Image: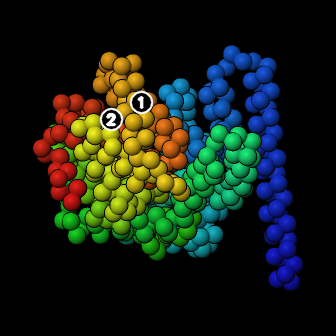
Amino acid sequence: MADRLTIKKSVQTSLSSARRIGHTTFSLQKAGLRWLRDREQPVPELLRDTMEELGSTYIKLGQLIASSPSIFPPDYVEAFQSCLDQTTPLPFKTIEKVIKQELGKDYRRLFRSIDPEPLASASIAQVHAAEFMNGDSVVIKVQKPGVERILETDFQFLGFSAKLTERLNKKIPESAITDMVEEIRNGMLDECDFLKEAQNIHAYHNFLREAEITDVVVPKVYLKATKKRVLTMERFYGAPLSDIEKVKRYAPDSEAVLISALNTWFSSLTQCQIYHADLHAGNVMILEDGRIGFIDFGIVGKISKPTWEALIALTVSIPQKDYLSIANSLITIGATNKDVNAHAFANDIERLVNAIMSDNDDEFDNPDQFLQQVTVKLSEVAQKHGVRFPREFTLLIKQFLYFDRYIRLLAPELEMFDDERILLGDSLH
């Protein structure tokens, strides 16, 4: 009987995967025909529409494009901004089935109330406000049904497509695309395990306690109501750090708030097991009591000591225009399976910087766009020398850009690395 059930489940999974791949192929063919028929629609917008139609996996990839101006061209970043908006929420009856599967049919004994209207709905999960029997206000993050299986199927398809692309285009370095797809896959599947996210929050809480940091907090996790697909946490009341009016209402000294958040994050790079690697405006809050709240630890990073030392060397070398040191730092940070000629790499970096500087006399008027242009071209030069920057490097660059935007919104007179109150010296050692 057990074998029959196992076979039945395997057949159902295979059929479901086949349907998903068929749906993906059909959507891509439809997009191709649409482009051939009407070439007036820009390719970035056509690709965005197709990825939004395909759902969870591709919306997450769209969010990666939208929030990575240091990696993707500006027209793609702009086109994919809609992927950052909330997705259409599922009915509470559908979400409740997942809660019952994870917490048991009598889960209601834990809660005095659960709001059926979600606070937020994203590609992987949606969040509902609730109240425990003891009166604690909490939020329940619930994974949408079938998301993990869809991710696995989609990445099988993407992995096959990546290998085929590498074989057909000999100019692409071996495994460059497949390695990137595998990194993204692992990161997204980690997001589907809310027990891992609970562990990340616990690790960050311990870091804050041991460092005696009291003006930055993370939500308390309620383990009795937390499983792989359900995460129950303390509810924070406040506003996104990008909401200038409320930041100034809850914390009149907005500069101090920014400096505290930045110092805490930098300290976590070396003093915590993990660092928060998705600090967009929705995940950094100014609380009503003036403290900073970091939420959503689904995407985190870990940095090795050699990589950290290389990053520090890089920040020192760039203002000095020491291109050989820049090249050596990037070789250490990057992933390479061959010996790299550092001097040739340094010469190419210098030529790249000089060319960009001569074409952009006003590069500091738009630092995001300038950094994006440099990073994209630098990646091309690095690939030429057999160096590929890992996901960790991309995650770090994204966080620097997030903080740079907050600084220019709330305290434009500050410079990210020059203000003496940003105690980077303590974090760098």
Position above or below: 389 against 82: below
Q: Nearer the viewer, residue 355 or 103?
A: 355
Position above or below: 396 against 98: above
Estimate the x, y position of residue 7 in percent, counting from the top left: 85, 74
Estimate the x, y position of residue 92 in percent, counting from the top left: 61, 54
Residue linked to disc 1: 352
Q: Amino acid at mark 2?
A: Arg
Q: Amino acid at mark 1?
A: Leu
Q: Kindly state the secondary structure of the residue where label 2 is placed.
A: helix
Task: Identify the image quadrant of residue 349.
Answer: top left
Q: Residue at x 81, y 69 (%)?
A: 10
Residue 405: which numbered mark, if any? 2
Estimate the x, y position of residue 303 in percent, counting from the top left: 38, 60
Q: Is residue 305 left or right of residue 300?
A: left
Q: Quadrant of the C terminus?
A: bottom left
Q: Kindly state the secondary structure of the residue where label 1 is placed.
A: helix
Q: Residue at x 63, y 42 (%)?
A: 172
